Amino acid sequence: MPDFKRISAELSDQDITELRALVVAARSKLPFLRNLTTQERKELAKLGDKTVGFDEKVQAYMVTNPEFVPGFIDTAEVHKDRLLRTRFMGFLSEFMTLAEHMDDTMTILGSEILMADLAYYQSVREAAKRGVPGAQQIYDDLRTRFPGGGGRTAASATA
């Protein structure tokens, strides 16, 4: 039997108001956040674990050999970006973990709800097969969720 109480909690209106205020406060501290399109995500160069060492070497060379820095590169801006990235990485994992936990919680809640819905649906289907008054109408309404069921009503299935 499924566990319908993996999560048993409530959020008050006040809790939701306070959580939204926290999100607004976080966003106000991060006004530089941007949203990329799928295409932009594919096209942008990525500074990942394998290229951090390369960046560290380039950073050192930019300082010791500035004559090779192209004129269109603002080294102060690159330094600013590096510093922001370092600080951002300091708390990004905490936000990502929170988002993952929230997503997992939504999955569990959805599963618990759907399992209860399916148990109710099976009960109504069985009641309709047995001719329990009122069950057939509910079954006919709910079974539209499962169009591959052959289109037979409970009454015609037992006939």
Image (cartoon, rainbow, N blue to C red):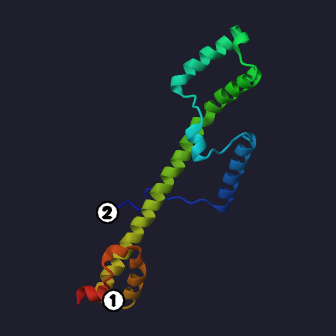
122 is higher (above) or lower (below) than 25: below
Q: Residue at label 1?
A: 132
Q: Residue at x 42, y 66 (%)?
A: 114
Relative side of 127 to 19, left or right:
left
Q: Residue at label 2?
A: 1
Residue 130 in sight here: no
Q: Amino acid at mark 2?
A: Met
Residue 105, disc: none
Q: Residue at x 39, y 84 (%)?
A: 140
139 is higher (above) or lower (below) than 35: below
**83 or 125: nearer the viewer:** 83
Q: Residues within 10 Å of mark 1 (few under 14, many from 20)?
A: few
Q: Where is residue 88 drawn, in percent x and y?
A: 65, 32
Q: Secondary structure at mark 2?
A: loop
- What is the quadrant of residue 51 in the picture? top right
Q: Where is residue 73 drawn, in percent x and y?
A: 73, 23
